[in-house]
Image (spheres, rainbow, N blue to C red):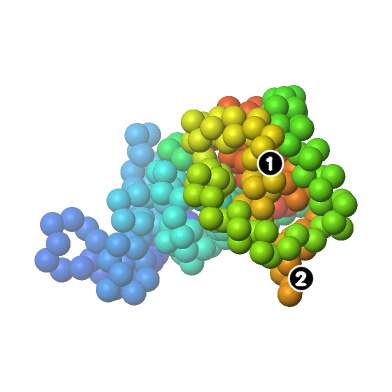
């Protein structure tokens, strides 16, 4: 008997040997501890009359085994740590991981390499079993689309503020990246600039355009640079003399701001592989 058929039989046996919880209007058979009645082992008959056994988490049949060894996964949009934990703990053929709010199935026997496959949001994903090789695989979502920054559009945005970025690069080069602390503290008192810079973590499009408009005013360039040092990042170090920053500090910051704007993104086709992928279009 093959591995997955063995798992089918194990789940069938577990279902038959687990007593339903008394006093319930529906059949509830916990797959683990009986107090965790939201985690169940279930028996499902599909439209063709085929009987499947698997695991149910809350109201979703998260994984179901067919008699031929195929496994159907479905998270019904719930890419949560608890759903991942349920698959990881109770599904015997794969482990699950979560990255950037997306559950990935780890197919350790997919062809010749280990593969992470992203779970779709609302539709089931069926993993097929090959009894000859004792491997399981899916042709779905091995090629996916990924959001990436459109380099042409990003370059156009950098050109809009190029004079400001050039000014910052020159100023930081002349000082070897050292900015006096008292200059930063003085700039922080400017509330208008403080609000504009503080809101650049995930700015709306209106705030983004307001920031770009602000950077057209040459008289405010120095204060904008000093304001940004107030928030800093991992590349900023402080000492008794002041702030030490890389020469390209502001260019890096503005690039990060551009990446918060979905209008400057496009998509590309990629293959899933041995690691999680981010920013997928599923």
3D distance between C-alphas at marks 1 and 2: 22 Å
**Can you give x and y, in whole percent of width and height, for residue 22 in the image?**
15, 68
Q: Earlier in the sequence, mark 1 or mark 2?
A: 1
Residue drawn at (54%, 50%), measured in percent from left and top? 190
The residue where tag 2 is placed is 241
Q: Nearer the viewer, residue 247 or 257?
A: 247
Residue occupying image coordinates x 88% and y 52%: 174
Left/right of residue 193 with respect to residue 267 in the rendered view: left
Tag 1's secondary structure? helix
Residue 119 appears in the figure? no
**Residue plotted at (70% across, 52% down):** 275
Location of the C terminus by quadrant is top right
Callouts 1 and 2 close, C-beta under 8 Å: no
Query: Residue 207's spot in the image, x, y percent?
Result: 51, 35
Q: Is residue 213 above or below residue 29?
A: above
In-front residue for pair 54/174: 174
Image quadrant assignment for residue 106 = bottom right
Mark 2: give few (<14), some (14-19) or many (20+) Cα within 10 Å: few
| Marker disc for residue 221 | 1
Towards the viewer: 130 or 241: 241
On the rendered structure, is 230 left or right of 240? left
From the viewer's side, name the closer residue of 96 and 133: 96
In the rendered view, does 167 fall on the left or right side of 192? right
Q: Give the residue drawn at x 42%, y 61%.
A: 82
The picture places residue 160, in percent across and down from the top left corner, at 70, 27
Determine which quarter of the picture holds residue 32. Answer: bottom left
Q: Is residue 95 visible?
A: yes
In the image, taking residue 134 as reference, residue 70 lies left or right, namely left
Instruction: Tell me residue 88's x, y (percent).
Output: 51, 63
Residue 49 sits above or below residue 242 on the image:
above
Q: Quadrant of the N terminus?
A: bottom right
Q: Residues within 10 Å of mark 1 (few under 14, many from 20)?
A: some
């Amino acid at each position: 008997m093959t591995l997955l058929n063995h798992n089918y039989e194990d789940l069938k046996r577990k279902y038959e040997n687990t007593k339903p919880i008394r006093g319930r209007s529906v059949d509830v058979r916990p797959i683990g501890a009986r107090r965790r009645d939201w985690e169940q082992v279930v028996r499902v008959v599909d439209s063709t009359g085929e009987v499947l056994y698997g695991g149910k988490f809350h109201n979703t049949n998260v994984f179901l085994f067919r008699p031929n060894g195929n496994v159907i996964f479905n998270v019904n949009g719930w890419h949560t740590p608890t759903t991942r934990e349920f698959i990881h703990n109770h599904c015997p053929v794969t482990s699950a991981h979560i990255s950037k709010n997306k559950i990935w199935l780890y197919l350790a026997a997919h062809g010749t390499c280990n593969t992470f496959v992203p779970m779709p949001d609302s539709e089931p994903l069926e993993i097929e079993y090959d009894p000859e090789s004792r491997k399981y695989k899916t042709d779905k979502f091995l090629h996916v689309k990924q959001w990436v920054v459109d380099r042409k559009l990003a370059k156009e945005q950098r050109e809009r503020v190029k004079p400001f970025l050039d000014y910052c690069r020159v100023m930081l080069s002349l000082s070897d990246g050292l900015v006096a602390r008292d200059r930063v503290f003085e700039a922080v008192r400017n509330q208008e600039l403080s609000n504009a810079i503080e809101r650049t973590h995930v700015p709306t499009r209106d705030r983004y355009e307001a920031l770009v408009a602000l950077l057209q005013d040459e008289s405010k360039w120095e204060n904008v640079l000093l304001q940004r040092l107030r928030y800093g990042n991992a590349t900023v170090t402080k000492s008794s003399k002041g702030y030490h920053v890389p020469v390209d500090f502001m260019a890096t910051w503005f690039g990060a701001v551009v990446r918060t704007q979905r209008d400057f993104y496009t998509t590309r086709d990629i293959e899933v592989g041995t690691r999680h992928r981010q920013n997928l279009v599923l």
